Each structure stands twice: as structure tokens, then as C-alpha cells.
Image: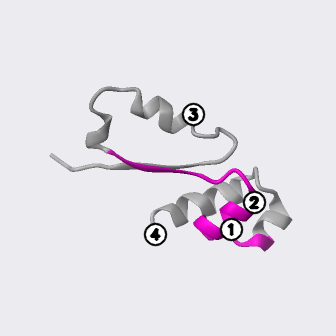
Amino acid sequence: MKKISLSVAESCTGGMLAQFITSVGGSSKVFKFGVITYSNNSKIKYLKVPSKLIKKYGAVSKQCCDSMVNNLSKI
């Protein structure tokens, strides 16, 4: 059996995804952590999203989301 873990990077949802996951009994066995980066500055500082990417595509874009997810795995 494979060991899996789950971490989430949220923005507009403000932590709703992490709340949903942790409302399930036993989720602590797989849920590692959640990061809520609501502001552009927090996306840049904590998830290393390039500011030029946010300026070009917007904070609520596929490109920004992809960057958030890719950098989440580096935390």
C-alpha cells in the first residue's frame, strides 16, 4: 500500500478546502498542511509566485494557481 499525503494551497477559498478535509475523521493520517495566501504579497512571499506572473495573468488565474501548487511541494 502506498503512503499518500495531502497539502493544499488556497487563496479565494480562505481555508474552506482545508476545513472540509479536516472535518473527516482520520484525515490527520494524510493531511499534511494548508497554506492560505489570500493577498498577492503572501503568494509572492510564501509560495514564491513571481510578481510578474501575477501582473500579467492575475492572482486568480490558471498560471498563478499552477505556480502556487508547484511551489507548495517545495515547502
Mark toward the start of the polypeptide (4 vs 2): 2
Residue 5 rendering spot, x and y as whole percentages: 32, 49
Label 2 residue SS: helix
Labels 4, 3: front one? 3
Label 3 amino acid? Met
Up/down of 33 relative to 56, above or below:
above
Pointers 1 and 4 in contact (C-beta within 8 Å): no
Q: Residue at x 70, y 42 (%)?
A: 12
The residue pinned by badge 3 equals: 16
Up/down of 57 relative to 20, above or below:
below
Label 4 amino acid? Lys
Cα distance in 3D space between marks 3 and 2: 19 Å
Q: What residue span does the magenta drawing correspond to?
A: 31-52
The residue pinned by badge 1 equals: 44
The circle drawn on residue 36 is none
The residue pinned by badge 4 equals: 74
Mark toward the start of the polypeptide (1 vs 4): 1
Q: Residue at x 80, y 73 (%)?
A: 52
The circle drawn on residue 40 is 2
Mark toward the start of the polypeptide (4 vs 3): 3
Label 3 residue SS: helix
Cα distance in 3D space between marks 2 and 1: 6 Å
